[in-house]
Image: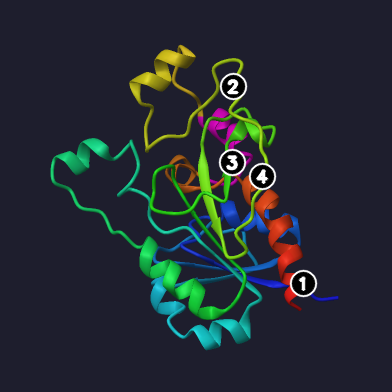
Amino acid sequence: MSKPRLLDLFCGAGGATRGYQLAGFHVTGVDLKPQPRYCGDDFHQADALEFASDPGLIARCFDAVHASPPCQAYTQAALTWRRRGKEYPRLIEPTRELLRATGLPWVLENVPDAPIRADYILCGCMVDLELRRERWFETSWRGFEMSHPHRHTHPVVSVVGHGTPSWVRERLGRNPTIAEYRAAMGIDWMNRNELSEAIPPAYTEFIGSRLLSVVEQAA
């Protein structure tokens, strides 16, 4: 039996992709930049919104879509740069419109306080990772489950930006190593810059199991 086909827009090196693979999907990734370490089944280097600009074609080729538009316009890590006048792309609204136009089940992911509906809120402490990294997921099926609140009982790694912020160093008493960052994220194939953009696979394995049920019901 063939696997359902998922399109992962703005895929990076494939953190979200790996989780969806574990949930049972065949995953095609799309990203503007080359991704030599991408872990998915297929990859296209292209502008994500241009690649998916024909909703009817996307609906014929795939069974579901995940999208993680750039988050720098909303993150605390980029706040200083925004205050200095740096502008970042705001692609959540056009991405949502595209997802809705496909008529497929979809997931839209971003950081806390981004302009998305938080149907699911996940952090490392909720999926057995030694990680502080909250992410929000808006879904076409308006999913909802009661989840545990944050329960970090001791200092854990936070993957923030492309270096080690002073507050992370103060909390841990050291600069985390690349091995610690990879272990915390559940990702062993990415470099530090790729990790900073990634979603832990455990998050999308959790979301993907729910999405798979929606796809099967739609079929």
Q: Earlier in the sequence, mark 2 or mark 4?
A: 2
Q: Determine the image quadrant of residue 58.
A: bottom right
Q: Nearer the viewer, mark 2 or mark 4?
A: 2
Residue at (46, 86) in percent of width and height: 54
In this image, 108 relative to 183: left or right? left
Q: Which residue is mark 2?
A: 152
Q: Position of residue 85 (x, y in %)?
A: 13, 46
- In whole angstroms, how far apart are the C-alphas of marks 1 and 2? 36 Å
In the image, residue 145 sits, relative to residue 36, either above or below, namely above
Q: Position of residue 188 (x, y in %)?
A: 62, 42
Q: Which residue is mark 3?
A: 122
**Which label is found at residue 202?**
4
- In whole angstroms, how far apart are the C-alphas of marks 4 and 3? 10 Å
Q: Nearer the viewer, mark 1 or mark 3?
A: 1
Q: Which residue is mark 1?
A: 217
What's the amino acid at mark 4? Ala
Residue at (71, 57) in percent of width and height: 210
Q: Quadrant of the N terminus?
A: bottom right
Tally of numbered tags: 4
Q: Nearer the viewer, mark 1 or mark 2?
A: 1
Callout 3 crowding tier (Cα within 10 Å): few <14, some 14–19, many ≥20? many
Residue at (61, 30) in percent of width and height: 149
- In whole angstroms, how far apart are the C-alphas of marks 1 and 3? 24 Å
